[in-house]
Structures are given as structure tokens and as C-alpha cells.
Image: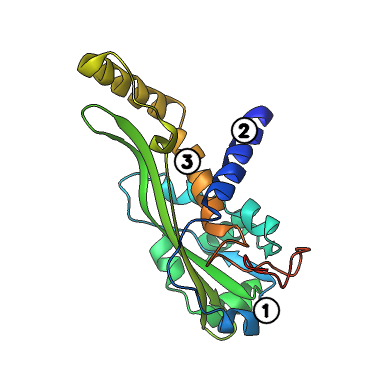
């Protein structure tokens, strides 16, 4: 299990490095972000727009590490989730609709992270089977309600797949095998790990800024 986690982390770091130079569109305005100086983040359960009911909690379980590595204190997601349940809030939509001042008064966090999952899981494409995970995120100051940052990330098992030999029959067999592997080994969770690193690792172009617990605090991708 430990070896698997190390492998996933290594793949995730490589994925981050691989996307570090990617063109992410116009430069983001960090004025409000820098003025806010958030040190602690409350991650709200992601809203799930995909057909897979496991998507929300899968991604939620993976966001703490990249945020902590980026220099932020993260309110323990299990504690936060239980607090919401104790107060009668059981769905991500209900929780993300809670007023920011209420969240700040309960958890004391400087900022809230609002995530939406638009794609999650394996899909069969006649001659291929791939796992895609796509998510967007907003960082909001819980003291003022100002939006500080927005981001988007996508990862796919197809990124490193090579075309198989054996013609059409070979491709069909490979597709069926991949579909079985994707379903049996929960490959979606591993791909969600890569997505979370791409989405929430600081220092990337238009990515999160480093938090105060990072030795790179105050630096950006262009420093």
C-alpha cells in the first residue's frame, strides 16, 4: 500500500512538472489574493456533476496533501464533514451554499475552497477505455466573501497510453481489458490524485500562491 501511495505521489509530481510550462491563458490578477494573506483553508465537499457517486469524496480525500505542500493549514476534512453532518447538512450543494461568515465563525479558517467535479470515471469508446477526472475550484476569503483565485485541472489515463498492435480485434481486446482494469483497481481514484495535484499545487502559472508555511512564500511561478 505504501509503495502504491509513493508511486501515485511520484506520478502526480511528474504530472505537475509536466504541466508546469503549459499555457494556461491570460495571467491571473492576484491583487485580492495577496491582500487577503490566507493561511488556513477549509475545503468544502466537492459538488459532483459526474454520474459516479464516489467522485466527491474521492477528490475530497486527496486535496489535503497538495494544499499542505503549498504552505497552508487545512482544516481536517473528516472533522469538517462530520461537523456539517451534525448540523443537518449532508449534501455538497447544501454545504457550499452556507454563508461565508457562518463558515468562518464555526471553523475559523481564512479561506474556503469550493470544488466542482465535472468528469470522473471510466468510459468505453468502442475501441478504447479511458479514465478522465476534471475539476474546477474557487478560493474564497471567508472573512470578506471576496473570490481570491479560480483554477481548473484535467487528467486522463489516456495521456500515457500507446496505440496497441493487432489491428481492430487487438484494439477491442485491449479496450475490454482496460475497462476491467479501470473498474477493478479503482483507477479513477489514482487519476483524481493527479488532478488534485495539478489543480492545487502552488507555483504553477495561474496556480495557487504559496502559503505562509512554505519556504517559497511570497514567490510565484515567474520568480
Residue matched to label 1: 37
Residue contact at pointers 1 and 2, CB within 8 angstroms: no
Q: Quadrant of residue 7?
A: top right
- In primary-sequence order, the first of circles 3 and 2 is 2
The quarter of the image holding the C terminus is bottom right
Identify which residue is drawn at 44% across, 34% down: 160
Left or right of residue 26: residue 40: right
Q: CA distance from mark 1 to mark 2?
A: 33 Å
Identify which residue is drawn at 67% across, 28% down: 3
Residue matched to label 3: 191
Judged from the image, the secondary structure of the residue bearing numbered disc 2 is helix
Judged from the image, the secondary structure of the residue bearing numbered disc 1 is loop
Residue matched to label 2: 7
Query: Can you give x and y, in whole percent of width and height, for residue 157 in the image?
Result: 42, 36
Instruction: Answer few, some or many: residues within 10 Å of disc 1's Cα (few below 14, many 20 plus, some between 14 and 19).
Output: some
Identify which residue is drawn at 67% across, 66% down: 210
In this orientation, which residue lies closer to the viewer: 84 or 160? 160
Instruction: Answer few, some or many: residues within 10 Å of disc 3's Cα (few below 14, many 20 plus, some between 14 and 19).
Output: many
Query: Can you give x and y, in whole percent of width and height, for residue 189 in the image?
Result: 48, 39
- The tally of labels here is 3
- In primary-sequence order, the first of circles 3 and 1 is 1
Question: For residue 163, which numbered disc appears in the image?
Answer: none
In this orientation, which residue lies closer to the viewer: 45 or 170? 170
Amino acid at each position: 500500500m505504501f509503495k502504491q501511495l509513493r508511486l501515485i505521489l511520484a506520478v502526480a509530481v511528474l504530472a505537475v512538472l509536466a504541466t508546469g510550462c503549459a499555457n494556461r491563458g491570460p495571467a491571473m490578477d492576484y491583487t485580492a489574493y495577496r491582500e487577503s494573506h490566507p493561511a488556513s483553508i477549509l475545503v468544502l465537499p466537492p459538488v459532483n456533476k459526474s454520474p459516479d457517486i464516489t467522485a466527491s469524496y474521492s477528490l475530497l480525500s486527496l486535496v489535503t496533501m497538495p494544499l499542505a505542500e503549498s504552505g497552508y493549514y487545512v482544516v481536517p476534512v473528516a472533522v469538517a464533514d462530520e461537523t456539517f453532518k451534525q448540523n443537518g447538512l449532508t449534501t455538497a450543494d447544501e454545504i457550499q451554499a452556507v454563508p461565508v461568515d457562518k463558515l468562518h465563525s464555526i471553523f475559523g479558517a481564512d479561506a474556503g475552497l469550493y470544488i466542482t467535479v465535472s468528469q470522473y470515471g471510466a468510459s468505453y469508446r468502442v475501441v478504447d477505455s479511458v479514465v478522465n477526472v476534471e475539476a474546477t475550484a474557487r478560493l474564497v476569503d471567508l472573512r470578506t466573501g471576496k473570490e481570491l483565485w479560480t483554477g481548473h485541472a484535467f487528467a486522463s489515463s489516456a495521456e500515457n497510453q500507446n496505440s496497441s498492435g493487432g489491428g481492430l480485434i487487438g484494439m477491442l481486446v485491449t479496450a475490454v481489458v482496460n475497462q476491467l482494469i479501470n473498474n477493478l483497481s479503482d483507477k479513477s481514484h489514482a487519476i483524481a490524485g493527479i488532478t488534485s495535484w495539478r489543480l492545487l499545487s502552488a507555483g504553477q502559472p495561474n496556480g495557487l500562491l504559496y502559503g505562509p508555511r512554505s519556504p517559497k512564500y511570497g514567490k510565484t511561478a515567474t520568480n
